[in-house]
Amino acid sequence: MDASVAIVGAGIGGLTLALSLQARGVPVTVYERADELREVGAAVALSANGLRPMDELGLLGELEAVATEPTELIHRRWRTNERVTAFPVGIDGSYRARFGAPYLGIHRAEFQRVLSAACPPGMIRLGCEVVSATADGTLTLASGETVQASVVVGADGVHSRLRSVVDPAAAPVYTGTSGFRGIAPVSSLPSLPDPQAIQFWMGPDAHLLHYAIGAHGEDVNFLAVVEGPDEWTAGAGPAQVAPNTLERAFADWAPAVREMVTAVPQSAQWPLYTLPPLARWSHERVVLLGDAVHTMLPHHGQGANQSIEDAVVLADVLAEPGVLTGGHAEAFARYESLRRCRTRQVQRSSLVTSDLLHLPDGTDADARDAKLTGLDPWLAWIHGTDARAETRPEALPA
Ligand SMILES: Cc1cc2nc3c(=O)[nH]c(=O)nc-3n(C[C@H](O)[C@H](O)[C@H](O)COP(=O)(O)OP(=O)(O)OC[C@H]3O[C@@H](n4cnc5c(N)ncnc54)[C@H](O)[C@@H]3O)c2cc1C
């Protein structure tokens, strides 16, 4: 078997890993079940901890050209336009100055396009669903073809198939909350104050987050999160639900919110999952990253950013001499030790945030607002971390 890495999944984590390995001269192939790389109707907010690695890959300029830097981070109460907090982001350059990279809102399809365009021809094999995998590094594709690699990386998302090789008992848990997503032109939102800001509207049993995307901030991406439904079929993805479900959930909210959730056709309802800690992150030649190993609620905007962090750390440890010729167990252990605690902290913090965003009016909500105004809005422990601090080649002892 030639020394090589096979990655299952060309999502944000898989593509970042592929590019990072390629930059280090490691042979890599990505197997993606989709026939084409596109995710319609959704965007992602990338924070400095995810964008510094993009800068190291030489891609930050290209991403900035198709993304929007929010002016401010604003929290508002649900029924009024009252600003609970407002922290500068791009308006005075303070975020970038503090963390060494910007905060960007970007369409997912654009992000995937920039990442995949940087991959050499043949590195990504589209239309290749992996139907089974074994711990010795053998993959079987839907076509019947089998592939063997020194190391197989499961970057195959929340409903990962590779996870069963590593920890058969692990399964994502529905959090009892769900979301609707949409992208609306700013021109269709005349009531919206501060359309270029990233804003949370917080209310009883629900919240709405939005930020501008596009090269000129011409569109607004929103995620409207509600409590319920109580049950979701285990492992099932988004579902179409009765028309006006979203409109009804936000019927009493501020005009700007009502305008946003009705500006575009109602999306599918997305069940929001979290993944309890796995017994281990790897088994024999198979290792996991991103949502496959630590699915989290999106309320810190960190799922994609943590996948990027995983990918660049894993690339560093896999590129070390001898790893692909038998030294993978030590490399996997080092990767897990660097990433397990960090991702668990972000995951837990996202869960707590969910409850705080959904408080009814009253003393608890007042206390939350008072705390928010005094809080470091960027949770520097999240945005300020350099994931590669201990694995970048120049950080290693000579
Ligand atoms: C509503 C919502 C909003 C979010 N907003 C944000 C945000 O603003 N910021 C943020 O950082 N995160 C956000 N997230 C989280 C983020 O989307 C995920 O954490 C991130 O996409 C995970 O990346 P990944 O590479 O691990 O997996 P994914 O991006 O899910 O990629 C997995 C890939 O694997 C492929 N695949 C799956 N199975 C197979 C198979 N058997 N064979 C071959 N290919 C396969 C899939 O087609 C897919 O391309 C949000 C999540 C949700 C649900």
Image (cartoon, rainbow, N blue to C red):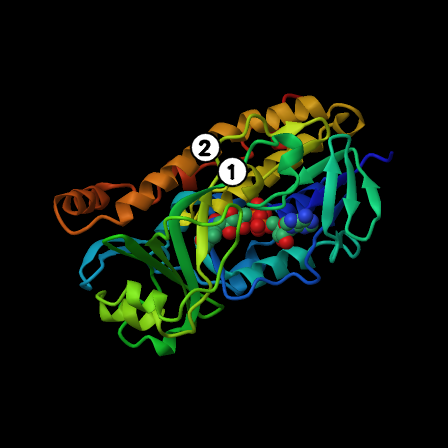
* Residue 23 image offset from top left, x and y in percent: 71, 44
Task: Give the mark nearest the N terminus, 2 or 1.
Answer: 1
Picture disc at residue 28: none
* Left or right: residue 151 compared with residue 271: right
Which element is circle 1 on? helix
* Residue 216 image offset from top left, x and y in percent: 45, 70
The three-letter amino acid code for the residue at tag 1 is His
Which element is circle 2 on? helix
Q: Write the residue at 33% across / 45% down.
A: 354
Q: In the picture, residue 315 is in which quadrant?
A: top right
Residue 27 seen in the figure? no
Q: Dot 2 corresponds to which residue?
A: 344
Say which of 227 and 185 sits in front: 227
Q: Are marks 2 and 1 in contact (CB under 8 Å)?
A: yes
* Residue 1 image offset from top left, x and y in percent: 87, 34
With respect to residue 128, does 321 lie above or below?
A: above
Q: Dot 1 corresponds to which residue?
A: 294
User: CA gap, disc 2 to disc 1?
Assistant: 7 Å
With respect to residue 23, does 254 lie above or below?
A: below
Q: Residue furthest right?
A: 1
With respect to residue 253, does 137 lie above or below?
A: above
Residue 197 seen in the figure? yes
The three-letter amino acid code for the residue at tag 2 is Arg
Q: In the picture, residue 292 is in which quadrant?
A: top right
* Residue 70 image offset from top left, x and y in percent: 38, 60
Say which of 142 and 315 sits in front: 142
* Left or right: residue 369 compared with residue 134: left
* Left or right: residue 254 compared with residue 160: left
Q: Write the residue at 39% across / 35% down.
A: 348
* Left or right: residue 361 compared with residue 379: left
Say which of 1 and 135 sits in front: 135
10 Å neighbourhood of mark 1: few (<14), some, or many (≥20)? many
